[in-house]
Every structure is written in C-alpha cells, then in structure tokens.
Amino acid sequence: DGWISLSHMTSDISMFPFKEWLKCQQKAITNHKEELSEIIHPQGPLLLRNTISRIIALSRGVMCEPEQIVIGAGTQLLIKQLMEVQKNKPIIAMEDPGYSRFYTLLKNMDFDVRSLKLDGKGINMKEVESSKANFLFVTPSHQFPTGKIMPISRRIQLLNWSTQTSNRYIVEDDYDSEFKYETDNIPSLQSLDRNQRVIYTGTFSKTMLPGLRVSYMVLPPDMLRKYRQHHADLMQNSNSLALFTLYYFIESGEYAKHIRRMNHHYEMKRKELIKQLELRFEDNVKIEDVPAGLHFLAQFKTYKDYETIEERAKKEKLEIYSMRRFMLTNKYKEEGVIDLIIGFATIKREQIPDTVEKLHCIIN
Ligand SMILES: Cc1ncc(COP(=O)(O)O)c(/C=N/[C@@H](CCC(=O)O)COc2ccccc2)c1O
C-alpha cells in the first residue's frame, strides 16, 4: 500500500522465530492438557510466574515472590483490575506528556487524574507534592514518550514521598526496559523500595509479539491481599495456551536469544536513522539521543504547526506521531519547532534514505 512507518506502535516481527514458537506450543499442548481443560489460577500459571520473577530479578532487580505476580492480557487491563480494587476514590497523578491510553482509561473510570509536568530528571517533584496523589504513575526506566531515564536521585525522592503518608503508591510502568543500547540497565524503582509502595508493571508486547497480549504486574503483599479479596471470582483473562508456550519459549533460551538479536537489529537501525536525519537536517534537528527503546524524540525547526505536519505526513503515506498524541492537558507549543516521535522498529534499513527525504519535504 506504499505506506512507510515511523510509528512507535509496532515491533519488527519479521525476525520472530515462529518455528521455535510452534515447537514450544507443541510442548505446551503435550504437557499441559490437564490445565488447558480447566480454569487455572486467576493470576496465570505458577510455573510462568516463577520464570517471570526470575527474569525481572536478574534484568531489573525486581524482588518478588511468584505469588505477587498477576499476568493479564495487556497492561491496560491489569491497571483497570488493580484500580477497581481501590476504595474511596484515590487521587491519581501521571506524567504529561505521558501515556494517553492510561489517562483515558483512568478518566473513564471516574478517577480524579492530575497530569504533572516533567523536568530534566523526569516527573517534577514539586508537582508531585502539590498533587496530593494517592497513586502516581511513572515510567522511570525510559519516560514515555520523551525517553528520559530517571536518575537515582529523583527515584529516591519519589520513594521518600511515597512513605510520607499512608495510602500512597507508585505505579512503575517498566514497559520499555528490555531495549537498552550503550547504557547499562538502571535497576527498577521497585528494587529500591523498602516500604512496599511500588506496584511494578511489565509487558511482553515490545519484545515478543504485540498480538500475544501478555503483560504482568507485581503487587506488594498488602495490595495483593486486597486484590485477591476483591477479584476472588475473577477468572484469568490471558490465553493459557499462549502462557504455557511462552513458558517453554523462555525456558528453552529462545527468549534471551531473541532479545539479544533484536537489540542488535534495533540498535543498528536506530544509529543509521539518527545519522541520516542529522546529515539531511543538519542543525534543524535536535535528537534526544537516549540509547533505549523502540523510538526516540526528534525536535525539528519549522514554522509549520502540528496539524499541517500531520496532514502532510498522511498525504505522503508516512505513518508518524507527534508529541500532541501524548500531551494530556498541557498542550504546549514551542515557537518554531515541533517534536516528532520516531519509531524505528519496522522501517527497513534500505528505506531509511527515502524516508528521511520524505520527512524533509513534509517539514520544509
Ligand atoms: C507507556 C506504555 N506502557 C505499557 C505499554 C504496553 O501495553 P500492553 O501492550 O498493553 O502491555 C505501552 C504500549 N504502548 C503502545 C501504544 C502507544 C500509544 O498508544 O501511543 C505501543 O505498544 C507497542 C509498541 C511496540 C510494539 C508493541 C506494542 C506503553 O506505551
């Protein structure tokens, strides 16, 4: 259809080892007929929760028992189920720009949702303090969408904030932590938490097949008790066959191999795209070169506004999103520049020069 995608909402599944996946699915069917024939644990199979707790301990420093993990069909569903448990309408705060799907979900659940500005270190502490929030949603490992990695100093400030009064929680959305290029992993907020204030969420959407819809959250013990009481009757909402298959895919080492392969593949494309953009736009582009994730932020000098750019991109059959998608209430517009979110997962290496040229004529 002639469209080129610089969307951040895709992953490059051309390299996904479907043959291995099918072998693991065969194993899942052979070894787990019993479980497939019945309603299994609402939090997902214990053997997969064991595996997940081991992976996130190794890669993110998350300390938890498998019993604290809830597996669900997407992070939004898990957040919805978690927030249904909360009594007397807690106040919610989240990053702006931020993940608009959480903002919409929580607003639709009639919560009072405050959108807080960022500063150079991530979510702004003064705004956090004045927000009176009970639940604070943050993306410290790779702020969505700006890419900022929250420094340890700000993490400590947030953790101190969370212990100042009761009924304060931090929801750490670690959605994009697998893909780190030069920098090594900063451990999760949850790994620094000594007061059971951090609710940790992760997903297999970025590293596996987005269509699998397998995500998970780690609940502190007291929140887990409340969650289990409230959702005593709730059945598991993930697909058991996919979960058992994922278990074998991880245990066989295929998952680790796939992440290594994708890290290399994405890093190459990211480097090439940044190089071509800087060559073509020279000092009319400023790139937040955060070496992580499947997208980066690029600020282009132009006197065109967001609407014009978005229209021209559509006409040029280039799928790309601007910062407007993520502005919750603070609809700022810097004079003479626009911010675009450049996703590099699906673009082919050989398409990069033409795509950069296309972007140049859209913006100028
Ligand atoms: C901040 C944040 N947290 C969690 C998630 C993951 O959600 P889950 O898949 O339900 O577990 C996303 C996915 N955000 C999605 C949409 C972003 C947008 O709306 O602009 C993009 O998701 C994918 C990107 C690449 C490959 C696969 C998926 C999230 O942006």
Image: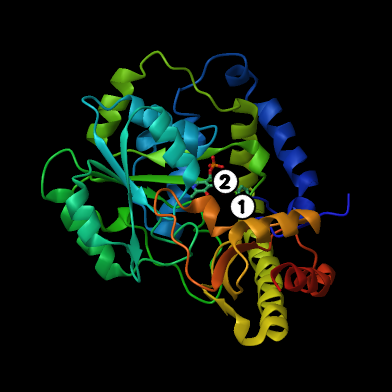
Q: Could you say which is closer to the camera, residue 57 or residue 343?
A: 343
The answer to whether any part of residue 311 appears in the image is yes
Q: Position of residue 264 (x, y in %)?
A: 67, 69
269 and 116: which one is in front?
Answer: 116
Rounded to the nearest angstrom, the CA distance separating label 1 from label 2 is 5 Å
Amino acid tagged 2: Phe
Q: Residue 1: where, in percent of width, then height? A: 89, 49
Does the image show residue 317?
Answer: no
Residue 304, by quadrant, is bottom right
Tell me the SS state at disc 1: loop
Residue at the limit of the structure toward the right, as seen here:
1
Cβ–Cβ under 8 Å for marks 1 and 2: yes
Query: Which of 334 and 60 lies nearest the eye of the viewer?
Result: 334
Task: Tell me if 129 is positioned left or right of 330 in this view.
Answer: left
Seen as rendered, the residue at the extreme left is 165
Q: Residue at x 70, y 26 (%)?
A: 29
Element under label 2?
A: loop
* Vertical order, 119 against 271 (above or below): above
Say whether mark 2 is within 8 Å of ligand 1.
yes
Picture coordinates of residue 303, whole percent (x, y): 60, 72
Along the line of sight, the residue nearer the viewer: 149 or 364: 364
> Which residue has dot 1 on it?
207
Q: Residue 296, percent across and down? A: 57, 67
Q: Please report the residue visible at 10 percent of the width from the left and 45 percent of the height from the top.
A: 165
Q: Residues within 10 Å of mark 1 (few under 14, many from 20)?
A: many
The residue that disc 2 covers is 204
Left or right of 74 on screen, residue 185: left
The kind of residue on which mark 1 rests is Thr
